[in-house]
């Protein structure tokens, strides 16, 4: 029996498609404060492991072989409502952090963060809190206080494609997202811009120069 098997602290599930990353995290957390209950290398395996172990904290990569993992968060919540999700990713930009938190993640940490910050993030989530890498938190605050940063980068992209006349299915296929995600993005865009009609969305997209003819995209 290893120290991790006998630990009585928070249970951790590591989900990443890179074996070296999973090994590194396991090594970093190799003390009696945590109990690593499993690993997964793909999204289907992640859901299966979450349902089986119901971990205190799920360490989840943002991208699995080019597929974003945020679409499985509703399923994760359904099978294990108490599990807290920490997105651990190579993406180090405020839009990825914003999208992750909006999708239901409880924390966001770039993989180039210090080892001690991963421990701090896990501890914060295990205690029922949230965690956001400080530099990204500052960037998000700057965007939120800037009218031009009202929409996330992904929302600006989706708005531009809507204004260009693409259907939800076409947008989803082009961005490799689900139609449900695109619908949620559209609802968020409408709420942030305070509009209801498609014509209003198109008008705002033109104002923001997000259409193909507007020059930004």
Image: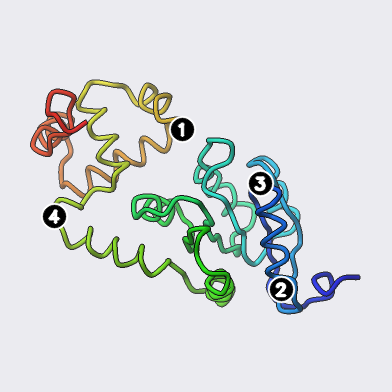
Q: Nearer the viewer, mark 4 or mark 1?
A: 4
Quadrant containing the N terminus in the rendered view: bottom right
Kindly indicate the quadrant of the structure image that contains residue 53: bottom right
Examine the rendered structure and indicate whether residue 190 appears above or below residue 130. Answer: above
> Disc 3 versus disc 1: distance between alpha carbons?
24 Å
Of helix, strand and loop, which one carries label 4?
helix
Disc assigned to residue 147? 4
- Residue position marked by numbered label 1 in the rendering: 178
> Disc 2 versus disc 3: distance between alpha carbons?
21 Å
Locate residue 151, reporting x and y percent: 24, 48
> Disc 1 versus disc 2: distance between alpha carbons?
35 Å
Of helix, strand and loop, which one carries label 1?
loop
Label 2: how many Cα within 10 Å (few below 14, some 14–19, many 20+): many
Task: Give whichever of 187, 108 is nearer the camera.
Answer: 108
Locate residue 176, reporting x and y percent: 45, 30
- Residue position marked by numbered label 3 in the rendering: 18
Mark 2 near mark 4, Cβ–Cβ under 8 Å?
A: no
Q: Earlier in the sequence, mark 2 or mark 3?
A: 3
Residue visible at 75% across and 76% down in the picture: 31
> Disc 2 versus disc 4: distance between alpha carbons?
43 Å
Locate residue 22, reporting x and y percent: 69, 55
Q: Is residue 45 left or right of residue 172?
A: right
Residue visible at 75% across and 54% down in the picture: 52
Label 4: how many Cα within 10 Å (few below 14, some 14–19, many 20+): few
Q: Is residue 87 left or right of residue 22?
A: left
- Residue position marked by numbered label 2 in the rendering: 34
């Amino acid at each position: 029996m290893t120290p991790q098997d006998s630990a009585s602290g928070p249970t951790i599930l590591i989900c990443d498609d890179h074996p070296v990353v999973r090994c590194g995290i396991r090594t970093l957390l190799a003390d009696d404060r945590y109990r690593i209950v499993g690993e997964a290398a793909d999204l289907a395996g992640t859901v299966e492991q979450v349902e089986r172990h119901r971990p205190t904290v799920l360490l989840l990569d943002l991208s699995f072989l080019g597929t974003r993992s945020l679409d499985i968060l509703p399923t994760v919540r359904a099978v294990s409502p108490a599990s807290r999700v920490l997105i651990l990713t190579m993406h180090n930009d405020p839009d990825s952090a914003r999208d992750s938190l909006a999708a239901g993640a409880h924390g966001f940490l770039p993989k180039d963060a210090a080892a001690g910050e991963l421990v701090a993030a896990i501890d914060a989530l295990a205690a029922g809190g949230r965690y956001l890498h400080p530099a990204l938190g500052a960037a998000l605050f700057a965007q939120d206080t800037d009218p031009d940063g009202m929409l996330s980068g992904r929302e600006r992209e989706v708005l531009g494609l809507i204004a260009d006349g693409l259907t939800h299915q076409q947008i989803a296929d082009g961005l490799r997202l689900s139609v449900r995600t695109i619908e949620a993005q559209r609802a968020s865009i409408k709420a942030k811009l305070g509009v209801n009609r498609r014509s209003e969305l198109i008008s705002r997209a033109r104002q923001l120069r997000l259409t193909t003819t507007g020059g930004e995209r």
